[in-house]
């Protein structure tokens, strides 16, 4: 489980992280701040390309999202 609340730096953090680091995350809870549409699309595409599926947004805070990684395997931990 990875919880990320980096006050707007989620774009730079996740868009630059190596793919093998993302494979180690099974569930991701992340606050995604508003940004330009191109950045938002790039972030969603990167997560989806690494197996993440958007499960739901928080009912109390629309910026908080839960993703699950279908490509995650216990053997990827190490």
Image: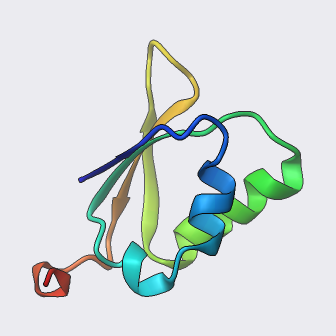
Position of 50 compared to 71: left or right? Answer: right
Position of 35 compared to 11: left or right? Answer: right
Q: Is residue 22 above or below residue 37?
A: below
Q: Is residue 4 above or below residue 20?
A: above
Give the residue at x 11% y 87%: 75
Residue 50 at what x, y percent from top left? 48, 77
Quadrant of the frame with the C terminus? bottom left
- Which one is nearer the viewer's eye here, 66 or 24? 24
Give the residue at x 57% y 23%: 62
Give the residue at x 28% y 75%: 24
Give the residue at x 88% y 45%: 36
Residue 1 at what x, y percent from top left? 23, 53
Q: Is residue 18 above or below residue 1?
A: below
The image shows a total of numbered marks equal to 0
Position of 62 compared to 60: left or right? Answer: right
Residue 19 at what x, y percent from top left? 48, 84
- Which one is nearer the viewer's eye here, 35 or 13? 13
| Protein image colouring | rainbow
Q: Is residue 57 above or below residue 70?
A: above
């Amino acid at each position: 489980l990875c919880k990320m609340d980096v006050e707007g730096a989620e774009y730079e953090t996740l868009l630059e992280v190596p793919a093998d680091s993302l494979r180690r995350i099974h569930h991701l809870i992340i606050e995604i701040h508003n940004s330009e549409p191109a950045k938002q699309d790039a972030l969603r595409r990167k997560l989806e390309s690494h197996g993440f599926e958007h499960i739901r947004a928080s009912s109390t805070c629309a910026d908080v999202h839960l993703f699950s990684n279908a490509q995650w395997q216990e053997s990827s931990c190490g």
